[in-house]
Structure formats: structure tokens, C-alpha cells
Amino acid sequence: MNLVIVNEPRPRVREIRLNRPDKLNALNRELRAELAVALRDVRADEDVRVVVLSGQGRAFCVGADVGAGSEYGMATPEDERRRILTGSLELFLEVWRLPVPVIAKIDGYCLGLATILANCCDIVLCAGTATIGWPMLPLGGGLISPTWVWHVGLHRAKEMSYRIGSTITGTEAQAYGFANHAVPSGELDAYTLRMAVEIARVSRDLLTLKKDALNQVHGRLGFEDAVRAGAAWDALAHTTRAAADVRAQWHQHGLKETLAAWKAPGPRT
């Protein structure tokens, strides 16, 4: 099965759809590799003027695959930093640097690492009922929140970061500034396609110029540095006693029981 589906719903519009619905499009090594190929193809195809990035099934993407057999949190801090940077963040920055606008179309869940991917897109459209936010277990830190600061402000980014499993709806995401627009779920496909077709009326060379002009200003303010720096912070977070305790709880009781324990109200030790 292809883990990334590519099609062209209209001339000059390329849709790239993450296709691992049984895992809510969680990012593993194979999915990241196929996404990288799809992005390279966009860069090479001069006919493409706009990309729509979406997810198959009930989620846009739920972030890193931390299930059984994943490589998440199992390496030395330096190897972990390198893995996060080269495996995910540089891939997301390739979306940021792509010579055409990228629209993130979010329906269902967009969690954890996937919110960085959305923040590296040019435009974010979501269903009002979408669920956007942080991982349900405190296994890392310092990776996601810096990219949120640019869109929602420091105080809201801190509130989201400090509360385990915090989420907002698509409607709230628009109000916060994370998303450009939130629309009813049943209207999201048509709404996104209309915007993509409108953008595709502009020539690719002019769209590239416009995107570069905006990204250079954003880059001078430190956005790309903030994305890359998150790899080091997250690698360090994986070495904390708190993260080790969560992994031990997970291995002893299983993922479902651990998630249920962290969802339950009350203090943690």
C-alpha cells in the first residue's frame, strides 16, 4: 500500500495525502520517506502551482509513531537529536521551502509533531470540529511549542505546552491564529479546492517570488532556527526522569492503560 497518495483534482493543483489511516497517519520512517519523494516531485514539476496536504481517514496526522517497534526515544541524546532533525524537521522545512504555496487541510486529529508540519505550511484550513494539540503523554518537550509562538503568541503556546494532552478545536484554532479558516467538516474539501484553484491562477514564478519574500522576513525573525533548535530540546527531554517513568509505566501496563491514567484527573508524582 502506498503510504502517500498523490493526485491532481484540478489542473496545476497537486494533492498529497498521508495514507496510513489505521495508525491515524502517524509518521514512521516509511511514511516520511514517501512524503519526501512527493515533495521532490513537486519541486521538479513546473506545472504544479499549489499543493494541498491532507490525511486519509480520521486524522490529518497524529504526529510521531511512538508505538511498539518505533525508534522514538530509544537513542542517545545526540543520536536522538539527529534523528528528530533529519527524520522529521528537515522534511517539514522542505514544505516550508517548497517553491509553491502549500495548504494544510486538517480534518479530524492533528497532534504533536503534525502541528509543526502544519505550521510549516503556507495556509492552514481546518474543519471546525478538528482536534488540534499536544501528545497525550509527556515523553518530550521544547519541540512543538516554539513553532506555535509565531502563530498563537507566547502565553497561549505556554498554556498548551504545560498542560498534558491539551487540545483546541478547529474553530478555536482559527480564533487563536493557528488556522486561517475553520469551516464545517462537510464543506472543507470544496472550500479548500476553491482556494487552491484560485491560487493556481497565478503563475508559478510569481508565487515562488511571493513565498520567498514572506519566508525571508519570517526567517530573519528566527522561525527556521526555532524549528531546528526543538530537536535538541526534545532529545534532552527524552532523558528526563519524568519521560523514563512514563516509558516504564507504558511497558508495564500497556499504552491504553497509560493513556487512561494520564487522562484521569488528579496529581502526578
Image (tube, grey):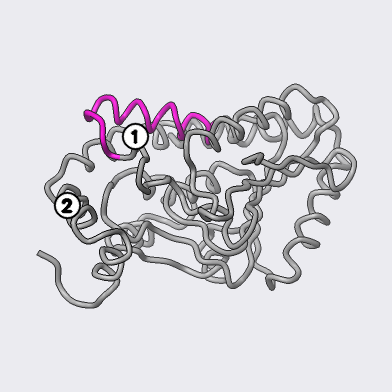
Q: Quadrant of the N terminus?
A: top right
Residue 151 falls inside the magenta stretch: no
Q: Residue furthest bottom?
A: 265
Q: Residues within 10 Å of mark 1 (few under 14, many from 20)?
A: many
Q: Would you place residue 239 above or below residue 168 in this image?
A: above
Instruction: Please name the amino acid that badge 1 sits on.
Output: Ala
Please name whichever residue, 266 or 93, is drawn nearer the observer in this view of the structure: 266
- Element under disc 1: helix
Segment colored magenta: 73-93
Question: Splitting the image into 4 quarters, where does residue 77 fall?
Answer: top left
Q: Residue at x 45, y 30 (%)?
A: 87
Residue under label 2, please give it: 248
The three-letter amino acid code for the residue at tag 2 is Ala
Up/down of 257 relative to 114, above or below: below
Residue under circle 1? 231
Q: Residue at x 14, y 72 (%)?
A: 267
CA neighbours of label 2 inside 10 A, class few (<14), some (14 to 19), many (20+): few
Residue pictured at 68% horizontal, 48% vertical: 103
